[in-house]
Image (cartoon, coloured by chain):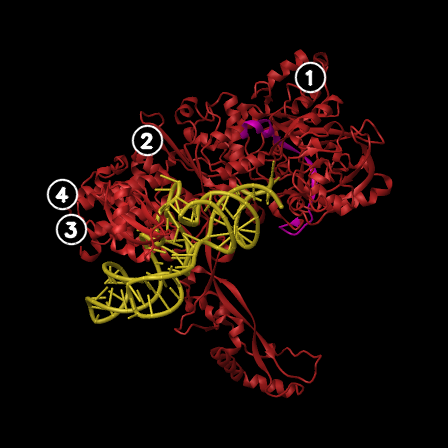
Chain colours: A red, B yellow
Amino acid sequence: MLLDLFNIMEYQFQEIEKKWRKFWSENQTFKAEDFSEKPKYYVLDMFPYPSGAGLHVGHPLGYIASDIFARFKRLQGFNVLHPMGYDSFGLPAEQYAIQTGQHPEKTTEENILRYRDQLDQIGFSFDWSREVRTSDPSYYKWTQWIFIQLFHSWYNPKLDKAEKIETLIKLFEKQGFEGNFNSPFTGGVEVDIKAFTAEEWNSFDESIKRNILMNFRLAYLDNTWVNWCPALGTVLANDEIVGGVSERGGHPVERKKMQQWSLRITAYAERLLSSLDNLDWNDSIKDMQRNWIGKSKGCSIKFSSVSNEAVFIEVFTTRPDTIFGVSYVTLAPEHELVKQFTTLENKEKIEAYITYSKNRSERERQADVKTITGEFTGSYVYHPFTMEKIPVWIGDYVLAGYGSGAVMAVPAHDERDFRFAKHFDLPIPIVVQANQKWDYEIEAYTEKQGKLIHSNFLNGLEVKEAIIKAIEEIEKIGKGQGKVNYRLRDAVFGRQRYWGEPIPIYYKNGQPYTIDECDLPLNLPSVDKYLPTEDGEPPLARAKEWKYKGQFEYETTTMPGWAGSSWYFLRYMDAKNEKEFVSKQKVEYWKNVDLYIGGAEHATGHLLYARFWTKFLYDQGFISFDEPFKKMINQGMILGRSSFVYKVFWEVSYKTTLVNQIFEIEKYLDLPTTFLSKSKTDIKNQMFNNEIIEFKNKIIIKNTKQLNEIYQTNPEIEKNSIYLNVKLIIPIHVDIYLVDNDKLNIEAFKNSRPEYKEAVFICEDNGDYICGYEIEKMSKSKFNVQTPDELVSKFGADTLRMYEMFLGPLEQTKPWDTKSINGVSNFLRKLWRLFNFDEHYVAQLTNEEPTKDNLKTLHKTIQKVTDDLNRFSFNTGVSNFMICVNELTEQKCNNKSILQELVILLSPYAPHICEELWVKLGNVAGTLSNAKFPEFNKEYLISETINYPISFNGKARFNIEFPVGMDSKEIEAQVLAHANTAKYLEGKTPKKIIVVVGRIVNVVI
RNA sequence: GCCCGGGUGGCGGAACUGGUAGACGCGCUGGAUUCAAAAUCCAGUUCUGGCAACAGAGUGCGGGUUCGAUUCCCGCCCCGGGUACCA
């Protein structure tokens, strides 16, 4: 066989990478052992939803980072668990199913294959033997099983943990129930049930008992507000609603109460909040969760109706001290009492207002502070202390789902109340004296500082004291009580969708029961269509024959997307277990995730739910820890770089005697599709641009025949007056694959669409057509999606891995631009050249003692790279490798021991090339992943001198070398004696000289 | 609106506890090598002025603290993300 000598010495990434991926897969190099002498380390990625579009370069960013870290930990002697799987239930597959009738399972399977193929190309060290898919019945069997545990549990506030519901039943049998407030059984949990005695309980029939228990179960049926779209027969997410109508089809959407399964996450509010402190997460994510949980201390207060003493409005306030500043009470428009409080003469107005606010999304209602709306109901309530009559309003700035859905408005001390009162001309009584100058006419005084005035028994108290006193007094008269409120709401757990886990519930006599555990999994039934039924039932209701034990109706909603992802990290430890969701021994060994990498967009969804489920499983004694993810890093989004061509829209001008008549001359002319290169698009310069004027003339000349005809048939148009103008220049997205370095491949572009075939291009002076660009989200419609595939085939996986890391800090949002990927590719080739391969593909290296410089370069790199890894600063890590290879190249280093260490150091970043070089260094194939990660020796880094920058008034001017250990006095003297110093002193005596030993000298003049 | 993150050359970014702003890479300019190209190597590259030495300005804007501020404090502007059924 003829060998191309030139090629054999070059870095052949394609063959190398293929070879090593095959080796890893055949040898199961990265299979994690359950139980090992080594310390364990669990590195987890947020698993992907396998969408039809496949992976784009943004997806692997976090996977590459976690893979580098996993490989690093492995080299440090840890037993690493690094699995991957798929969050394979989800809307897009269902949407596709609705459109095409194809079963989502099939689409999902195809997408997963594509994902796997793409993931494999990048050389990840995943242990694929542990793969999970949330849509696989062997997986969702256990999601359903956990749901059943939740259903059969309640939260015992006394023990502050979840317990089996039987313990609650026993308590009821013994001591009954004291009612809502301060009951040891409910704690902070909102329930609305009347007190009963033990005897009463025992006399209740099954269905009453079950109804009562439903108020305590952690998985329960509840009436919740949803965005209902009657035309689509389904509930919509807030972001599926645009401007009050559905994004798909533009149908009206209304707020509606609907009975649905919910999970009582609110029971865990306090624990979810307090245990955040011990997590090694970003402060920003922790803040998001804290705000989401939204703990506020305050007081509930009852305002009795003037017309009916038995009816009262309950409000929650964090400022009970301002009780004497209440000027009105506002109900959310959806509040249950609105009807009762609306007087006959206001009925029409109120109903109109309710309809209006129904069409506004919750987000709109909160965000829009400029539009102040509301209506007076016509009724009044009594002030609990003064017994004054207070008007009851409705206003959509009050949300039904938060607190009690009603506020006592204190306009002088709350911004929203203030704006509302100003707008409707309601009184603004001042009850807190600001301790600074304050114009109460202009702005509400909301500080929790100052003395109470006009407030009866609160007068003279500081706000903080007044809050305590007010609660005491309110409790004394039985009109409310001190209370902690959480913004966190229970999580709606039912979806009106097909492609999700069936909820393992069946109905008997209208009562929900869980199916027997031995009947799990409850498989998704086949249906004829993936749409809701004609009467608005979810798609599962289409399965007519689908009945439990052949007779009982199943629940027809399915679980939400976050169900499967709330516990998947546990399943990886024991992915094939058919008897348990995870074995106790395995979960005891692997414990929780040591490092979790994923997007910050999951802050208040998945990351909160997973914490909730983990705490529940901990309470139930299944696992020994109550937090899933010890440390978390959030990777930033990668934005696309879209390219644009600029299309000209022509306008024809002419002179005519008929002012009112429009001649559509454009229609008769042959006007070419024209694109302007970037620098020609400035419309202001169009008139003076000779090239364009000339071009327009050419078009006119080309159209001579048509023009003559027009002049002939339309004598009103002045001869030779027709002229072309550029009316508009519109940027059009052009596929980035037709653009190289902003230069358009004109021929390819012309061939991309028939209508561009004859297009004309006005180029730059050098003949190139230069495109414009913009940084935006990657999406198909913007033609800016960069998939990893073509980059891997063009540059190799190692280059892609390093380039993605080199782009910038992992956690930052950053634009994707392939322009500089060849920099990383050059780096790997430069590394390759250090090995001096001869024509037999043998590295020509020396075994001699490395030089001082060699060792200094190596150990500096070891120190920096290790430090970078520990700080998750992968981009500076790549830079440090580049500096290292540059220095070794300059030193002409072919030293085997130096290169061997470097190969180990680099292998987490660029595993394929390192495996190859490892073997070429004379090591046994496959042993690299068991090598020992190098440690730096600071002896090699010691230098004898320090280079001091000498600055004057903080501005560095020149440098002087001083020996290490020279004291500040000596340095000062030397600096003053230095010839350059005099120049900057300009004859003046320095006021002060600051010497920071080992760093800098600053002369103050 | 609320909460969170960010703003440094032509571009991506570096500067870790306040200590030489612009490491590293891209791009660009010039040169070497080559029949030529690719690849490679060398030099330059924040801006303004200057042949240069050098001088001045400079980390979104305006103030402040400090011998010294990209870094700390106060007040603004702009961009991005989240905001409960997209995952």
Q: Is residue A336 above or below residue A992?
A: above
Q: CA distance from mark 2 to mark 4?
A: 31 Å
Q: Residues within 10 Å of mark 3 (few under 14, many from 20)?
A: few
Residue identified by numbered label 4: A847
Work out whether mark 3 precedes mark 4 in sequence or the reverse, and give the earlier one. 3
Label 2 SS: loop
**Pointer 1 residue:** A177
- Amino acid type assigned to the residue bearing label 1 in the image: Phe
Q: Nearer the viewer, mark 2 or mark 4?
A: 4
**Nearer the observer, A28 or A600:** A600
In percent of width and height, residue A815 lies at: 44, 53
Q: Which amino acid type is shown beneath numbered disc 3?
A: His
Q: Which residue is mark 3?
A: A840
Whether the magenta-drawn stretch holds residue A479 is answered as: no
Callouts 1 and 4 in the same chain: yes
Q: Are marks 1 and 4 in contact (CB under 8 Å)?
A: no
Image point 59% across, 83% down: which residue?
A722
Do circles 1 and 2 both sit on a common chain? yes
| Dot placed on the residue nearer the N-terminal end, 1 or 4 | 1
Q: Secondary structure at mark 3?
A: loop
Q: CA distance from mark 1 to mark 2?
A: 53 Å
The residues bearing labels 1 and 4 have C-alpha atoms spaced at a distance of 84 Å
Amino acid identity at mark 2: Phe
Extent of the magenta region = A245-273
Q: Can residue A106 be seen in the rendering of this structure? A: no
Confirm whether residue A104 shows in the render. yes
